[in-house]
Image: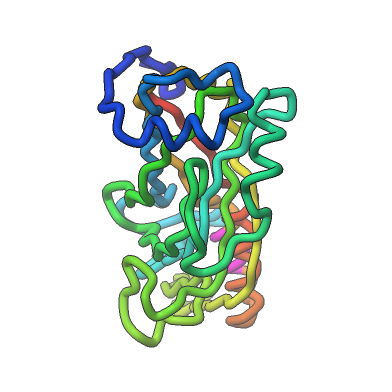
Amino acid sequence: MHPRTARHRLVPRALAGASLACAALAASAACDAGTAPTSLMLSLRGGLPADGALVADDGATLRIGTARLTILAAELEACPTSPTAAWRALWLPGVARAHSDGSATRLGEPHVVDLRAATATELGELSPPAGRYCGMRLTLGPADADAVGLPSPDFAGTTFALAGEVDLPTAHAVSGRSTGNLTTTAALTPALDLAAGDDVRVELSVGDADALVDAAIGGLADDALAGALLLGAQRTITATVSR
């Protein structure tokens, strides 16, 4: 099966919570009394090799020991022409904050994701109203002490951290840590059309092997390395949808 091929499967769901969604969407013809809510499970995985080894064109090898990224918030974005676009602009805040309130289309609990983990990290479940959605907006920023998946107390305040070793011209350690804030949107291509009762999964993938190798082997200082890698992650978040 092509990795982006969606298998249609409508799953009846309990009606609990449907009345709340309909109240928020009272003006929308897409929400009728008794309509089952949708379910969208969001997860994220690193796009790095299982052994953490990346090879540059000149033969140099970067072996990544650790690579972690903090996701502060994730928000499903309606397509500009969607009937729900006006509702989103009215009801949803545009800036995410650590442990900010969630909504039907937004997760506000920070997660620290191990980009070397063999399995995807579950970020949570959304219950968006029926409609057409074109992107998943992520806010990357420093973890707080209560972030899910915090590896140790000293990781608090960190957005992205990487440590490893490069073997050329001579073997030497590389590491980087970023505390910056960035927002990026992974496009849903094709757009995600959700009907009442749909049960879908969206998996995000982060990791640009070329950017990692170029930044690490380029001999950047620690802070610059972390910043370059964070920007690389921001540019290379992709989304895959399954039903």
Task: Work out whether residue 40 or residue 59 is closer to the camera in this orientation and state it.
Answer: 40
Residue at left 58%, top 68%? 217
Residue at left 39%, top 80%? 145
213 drawn magenta = yes
Residue at left 38%, top 70%? 147
Residue at left 37%, top 12%? 8
How many numbered marks, from 0 up? 0
- In the rendered view, tell whether residue 222 sits above or below residue 187: below
Outermost residue toward the bottom in this view: 154
Q: Would you identify the image quadrant in which residue 13 lies?
A: top left
Percent x, y for residue 177? 53, 78
Percent x, y for residue 173? 45, 80
Q: Is residue 24 left or right of residue 145?
A: right
Q: Is residue 239 left or right of residue 85?
A: left
- In the rendered view, tell whether residue 116 sits above or below residue 159: above
Percent x, y for residue 19? 41, 31
Q: Which residues are magenta?
A: 212-217
- In the rendered view, tell whether residue 160 sits above or below residue 90: below
Task: Work out whether residue 195 or residue 21 is closer to the camera in this orientation and state it.
Answer: 21
Screen quadrant of the C terminus = top left
Task: Work out whether residue 238 or residue 16 is closer to the camera in this orientation and state it.
Answer: 16
Dominant secondary structure of the magenta stretch? helix
- In the rendered view, tell whether residue 105 sits above or below residue 99: above
Percent x, y for residue 64? 40, 66
Q: Is residue 57 visible?
A: no
Q: Is residue 94 left or right of residue 6?
A: right
43 drawn magenta = no
Q: Is residue 89 left or right of residue 240?
A: right
Q: Is residue 101 visible?
A: yes
Q: Would you identify the image quadrant in which residue 30 lies?
A: top right
Looking at the picture, the colour scheme in use is rainbow
Screen quadrant of the N terminus = top left
